[in-house]
Image (cartoon, rainbow, N blue to C red):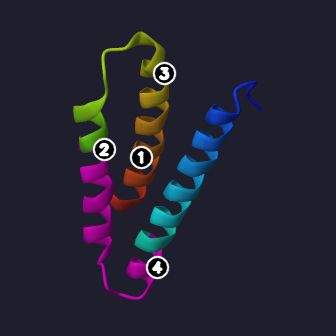
Amino acid sequence: MSDDLRVDALAASELVSSSLLASLVGMLGAKGLLSDKEVGEIYEHAYSLLKEHQGNEAGLASIYDAALEIIEAELLEYRK
């Protein structure tokens, strides 16, 4: 845990948001409301948004790179 409780709160908030969104997309796909192609398109769009909005701040580059790698791993499932 961080010495700064705000960092911990922010990290926890991000985990909640990302897990809820991933759950929602997965559930919509499982219920047939989104096709596999559409789920893949959601991940493609998320990847594009992240690439577009990543800053040039050196301290954040590794965080963006890690996030992009996670989305790339998900995309592999939908590009088969």
Which is more toward the observer, 63 or 10? 10
Does residue 79 sit above or below 27 in this rendering?
Answer: above
* Residue 73 drawn above or below residue 33: above
Three-letter amino acid code at the position of disc 4: Met
Res 44 seen here: yes
* 56 lies above or below 1: above
Q: Nearer the viewer, mark 3 or mark 1?
A: 3
Instruction: Please say if the residues under marks 2 and 3 sit with CB atoms less than 8 Å apart.
Output: no
Mark 4 or 1 closer to N-term?
Answer: 4
Q: Which mark is residue 47?
A: 2
Q: CA distance from mark 3 to mark 1?
A: 14 Å
Magenta span: 26-48
- Residue under label 4: 27
Amino acid type of the residue that numbered disc 3 sits on in the rendered structure = Ser
- Asked if residue 60 lies in the magenta stretch, the reply is no
Identify residue for label 1: 71
